[in-house]
Amino acid sequence: MQIETYLFEDGVWNKEIDATLDSANTLIVMFGSINILNVKDGIDDIIHNYPTSTIVGTSSSGEIYDNEIFHDSLSVSVVKFSKSRFKVVVKEISEQNSFEVGKDIVNELKDDHLKSIFVLSSVVNVNGSELTKGLSYNAPKECIITGGLAGDGVDFNKIWILLGSKLMKRQIVAIGLYGTSLRVGSGCRCGWSRFGLDRRVTSSHQNILYSLDNKPALELYKRYLGPYADKLPASGLYFPLMLLEEGNDKPILRAIKAIDEENNSITLAGSIPQGSIVTFAKANLDELIDGAQEAAESLMVSYDKSQKALCIAINCVARKIVLKQEAEDEIEIVRDILGENVSLVGFYSYGEISNISEGGCDFHNQSMTLMLLYEEDNHV
């Protein structure tokens, strides 16, 4: 397995493109600016230099390359597999069919040697929670599923999903990875602190929360926020809801998207099942960075450090906003933990997908999700 990474910024590549890696078994994944015209020349260069390779990509709210964060750039990974193979599926996705699309993707990719599924999805009218339920519905327990929802601007009109030379807005691209020598790892942590009591969701519908412990959700939320309540919904970025699932040791965050004063409800960035247990969370900068460190350390447990590997980071844009000038600190820590044999690329997303221990995957907000990929050289 051969790996190369590139950064395209201000119309210039950081190094010369190695076109010898082009092959039918080469996978190229790129993350780029929502201002597509600023990176179109870079995308065209990749398409020109790798005519037989498979190229996928997505818009981002910030690009990750090595130990830095970039904006208005293109972060590219090129992987030429030697013993493994891959298959790509593309589907149109909407809020209404997110579950079925997830199921269909797995059904089309599934075979005896499926190791992992990596997805890049539009964020326009997509139900991330239903998508991950669909992906989990019939997925093999040992299959690691990761990915994310495309980054975008505030008006959701600059999103792009790429397959080959085709730019799309309402699609999901899924890559199935296969092979007995292929090794895939995944890590996901949030690092947000719990505060307040655990409460039961007594009334909700999909991603709209109406009541907690039979009390109006928005009224209760404002009471916890105190002086920050006057700045809702913007201040909700710093105080997500934490979903506590039985049997899952990793809490799932739900970002606040909107509030409705008239019916005292909160609209979240993912489903919030009625009857589930939740608590409020708050940002602590040190703990957010610790969460990124834990995500990286979890990848290292089974990684053979003598092997060349690729790590893809899917990081929630909310973390970048909250961490501000310290956002690069968590990238640097992850980079240091991965070591010199691991190449790092990634993007800031509008929702993260990460596998869970019992098989399948969950939809996350405001997390750091990492995927590690390599082939064992000595495996026949």
Image (tube, grey):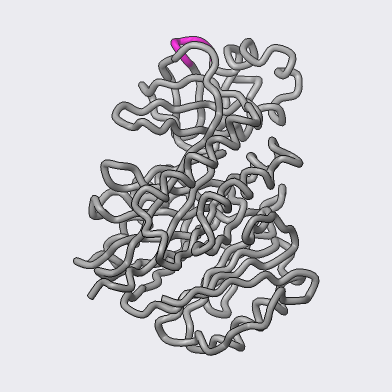
The residue lying toward the viewer, choosing from 299 and 261, is 299
Residue at 71 percent across and 47 percent down: it is 154
Q: Quadrant of residue 285?
A: top right
Left or right: residue 168 compared with residue 73: left
Q: Main secondary structure of the magenta part?
A: strand
* 211 vs 66: above or below: above
Left or right: residue 298 compared with residue 345: left
Which stretch is magenta? 212-216
Residue farthest to the front?
306
Residue at 54 percent across and 20 percent down: it is 280
* 366 vs 88: above or below: above
Residue 7 point in image, percent of width and height: 67, 70
Say which quadrant the N terminus sits in.
bottom left
Residue at 47 percent across and 74 percent down: it is 79
Residue 256 point in image, percent of width and height: 60, 31
Say which quadrant the C terminus sits in.
bottom left
Is residue 195 among the parts visible in the rendering?
yes
Residue farthest to the right?
10
Is residue 127 among the parts visible in the rendering?
no
The residue lying toward the viewer, choosing from 62 and 184, is 184
Does the magenta run of residues contain 214? Answer: yes
Q: In which quarter of the image is residue 235?
A: top right
Does the magenta run of residues contain 209? Answer: no
